[in-house]
Amino acid sequence: MSLRCVAVRVSLPAMDRVAWQEGRLGRHATSCLRCQAETARYRKLHRSLEALGHVIEPAPPSVLARVHHAIAEPRPEEPKPRGPLTGRVAGVAATTGAVVAAAAGTAAVVAWRRAHGAT
Amino acid sequence: MAPGEVRPEDGDLLLRAKNGDRAAFSELVRAHQNEVYTLALRLVADRDLAADVTQEAFVRAWRALPRFRGEARFSTWIHRITVNVAWSQRRRASRHRADPLDETFAEPVAGDLSPERAAESADMRGRLLDALATLSDPVRSVVVLKDVYDWPHAEIAAHLGISVTAAKVRLHRGRRQLRERLWRDMEVAG
């Protein structure tokens, strides 16, 4: 077996559907009898695999009943959509808001007392 | 119905099923179960496990249906779910060795073969399925999705959680192993 034959044997498993359709084979693969035979085997393998995609196997009759039984329960609750302020963000925002409100209230009380001369 | 063919009635059934109509969903299951089962069978090479995968795929589809936006066909969507379920269930059941398929295989949907060619084709198909069943799960998954279902490498890689290069390597290895097992007595080199 020549190096060219070895190269053909390495390249044949890499040929995809388009390559087979377009007959992308080197000159050696089409002239060497051994490589022709090997190419024919891979072509047959490729066609048989492709043909397998057109064979439909009947599902066992139990499948439909099993699915029917399994979906009898209600669907799990949908996760509620998260708003702009949820979880930790909402907590931080609430705390910040409370601190700001408290500070504003304190400042207002101090300002009122000063304005009215309270001691 | 040929694989991948659009079913116009799916739209109405889908809408009803999304709104919780179990009868409509059962119709969808009835319409797609053979294709889904076939895909599962090709992936896991075990009839009992394929039935389990089919059931689980439809149950997951039912639960996820409210989030299905219809960007892909229902058949495409359920096929993707099936691949994910098959992959996870096969890993779970990996300690159980799959027996080679031993049943009579269904005839092709279409074809005008002569009796001799049909017999030869059926024989080849049986040998091919036996050979596929001997491949490792990761290698068989790639061969089935690429060479039987013509998925793009990128999609195969994404579904199996591997790189595109790894998918191509597995494909190359799988084809070589199939060739070796189908024609054992013929020379293999390279």
Image (spheres, rainbow, N blue to C red):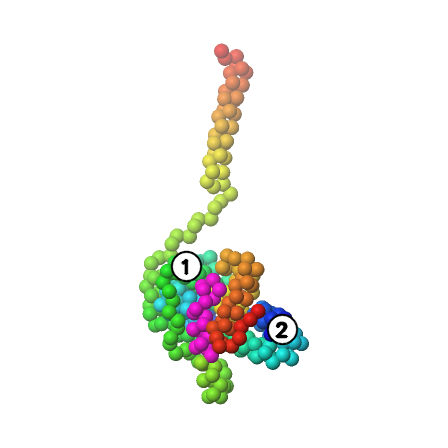
Closer to the camera, A100 or B86? B86
Quarter-wise, where is residue B61 in the image? bottom left
Q: Is residue A94 visible?
A: yes
- In this view, A86 is above or below B6: above
- In this view, B162 is above or below B131: above
Closer to the camera, B86 or A95? B86
Range of residues picked out in magenta: B124-140
Query: For the C terminus of chain B, which image quadrant?
Result: bottom right
Q: Which residue is mark 1?
A: B91
Q: Residue at x 55, y 57 (%)?
A: B163
The answer to whether mark 1 and mark 2 are in CB contact below 8 A is: no
Q: Where is residue A47 shown, x and y percent of the image?
A: 53, 77
Outermost residue to the front: A1
Q: Residue at x 67, y 76 (%)?
A: A27
Q: Which residue is mark 2?
A: A2
Question: Is B65 covered by the magenta stretch?
Answer: no
Q: Secondary structure at mark 1?
A: helix
Q: Secondary structure at mark 2?
A: loop
Pointer 1: residues within 10 angstroms few (<14), some, or many (20+)?
some
Quarter-wise, where is residue B26 in the image? bottom left
Q: Amino acid at mark 2?
A: Ser
Q: Where is residue B172 shown, x and y percent of the image?
A: 54, 66
Q: Residue at x 37, y 65 (%)?
A: B97
Q: Amino acid at mark 1?
A: Arg
Closer to the camera, A63 or A71? A63
Question: Is B134 covered by the magenta stretch?
Answer: yes
Q: Where is residue A17 shown, x and y percent of the image?
A: 58, 72
- Count how many numbered circles sit on residues in the image: 2
Pointers 1 and 2 within a single chain = no
Residue B74 tag number: none
Q: Where is residue A25 shown, x and y percent of the image?
A: 64, 75
Q: Main secondary structure of the magenta part?
A: helix
